[in-house]
Every structure is written in C-alpha cells, then in structure tokens.
Amino acid sequence: GWTRTAPGVVAIGPYRHTLAERAMAAALSASPAWASHATAALLWGWEVRHGRIELTMGRDRGVKRADVRIHSTARLSVDDVGTVRGVPVTSPARTLLDLAGRTPVAALGASLDDALARRLVTLETLASIIPNQGGARWNRPSQLAELVRQRQEVGTVESPLEARVLRVLMASGLPLPVCQYEVVIGGRRYRLD
C-alpha cells in the first residue's frame, strides 16, 4: 500500500510518521528545501524543543504550508547543507547558527558540545562564519559566538557530563578549567581531565 505524506508526496510501504519521515516528506513537497532549525537539530541528535517541521529554502518561493514552518534565505551555500539518514538537512554549523537566539543557551551549548565531540564542526569553522551572520532580525549569533569563545578558552569537552559540569561552573561564575590539558612527564604525554 501507499500513504499520502505531503502534497505531491507518497510513501510506498509502511509509513511510521517518524521525525525523519515527516521531514523527508516536507522537504520533497517543497523541493529544493532542507530540514532546518529545531528539526535539523533533532535529526543531528541534539535535544531541543520542537513543534512543527521546519524547512529552509531560497527566497520568494511562495511555498506555504500550515503544518510546516518555512524559513527563506538568500544565503544557503553547498557548505550549509547535507543529509542525515537520507533527509536533506542544514549542516551542523548552519543548524547551530539557526538555533542561536531562539534556543536556551544551555541547550545551544549542549548541542555545540555534542557537535564538537562528534567532530561535526570545529571551533575554527564556527568562529570564521559567525561574523557573516548578522543583520537578520531573528538571527542573534552573539550567543553562539560567546559559547565558541568560551570553548576556545577552556578547550572542548568529550562527554555530556563534562559539558554539564562546565555549564554549571560558567553559570556559577567560578573560574573555568582547561579541558583536555596535556602534560609531558618523562617523555610521555598525559591528559588531565
């Protein structure tokens, strides 16, 4: 059998209404479009608040859907997009930028730490693209810029617990440790964590 999943899109075989299936159906119905913002964050494996499926596409496409939040942009390069489990999605760096200013700092920091630990982004890449993102009323990359600056100072974390401890220290105003600090003793390298 088949199931109509979105305007102009049908699924052949079982359709389980998973986030990935709903995002794929929405993206196909508005093609070319990419799952973005909170939808992309969830597809990347980050825990953020989510409502409707969110898509990003080029400006002036005239696509309107009550069940999908459409974001239009004049700037979407090949570096800004990719796929997760076959679903067209904004890149981790672009997704973090899209979340900045609309996601609580703790959730944005947790997403950043996960992306860094999984090597989906680098601090250098984010630091180089954040200055080019200002101007739009909804986009406040300053939150992400501050998180990147903090991670550049203390180093990247390698576990959710380590990230949580770092966030607690930051929120408490305590001095921040240096993460993954390397020392050499007797010619051997060790990491203090």
Image (spheres, rainbow, N blue to C red):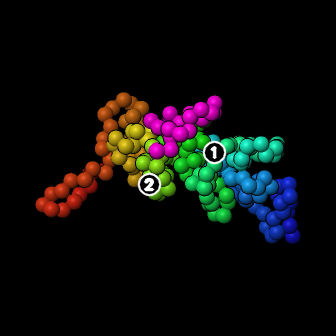
In the displayed structure, would residue 78 be above or below residue 164? below
Q: Amino acid at mark 1?
A: Arg
Quadrant for the N terminus in the image? bottom right
Which residue does the image show at 60% across and 42% down from the upper left?
Answer: 98
Q: What residue would you read off at disc 1? A: 75
Residue 83 magenta: no
Depth check, front residue: 28 or 57 = 57
* CA gap, disc 2 and disc 1: 27 Å
Q: Residue at x 44, y 54 (%)?
A: 117
Q: Mark 2: which amino acid?
A: Ala
- Residue 108 in the image: x percent, y percent? 52, 41
Residue at screen point 46% across, 44% down: 128
Q: What percent of the width, then of the height, locates residue 180?
A: 31, 51
In the rendered structure, the answer to whether residue 32 lies left or right of residue 122 reads right
Question: Is residue 107 something that shows in the picture?
Answer: no
User: Is the Cβ of the residue at disc 2 closer than 8 Å to that at disc 1?
Assistant: no
* Residue range corresponding to the magenta coloring: 128-146
Q: Residue at x 18, y 56 (%)?
A: 184
Identify the residue under disc 2.
117
Q: Nearer the viewer, residue 181 or 79?
A: 79
Q: Is residue 130 magenta?
A: yes
Whether residue 93 can be seen here: yes
Secondary structure beneath dot 2 equals: helix
User: Badge 1, how many Cα within 10 Å: few under 14, some, many 20+?
Assistant: few
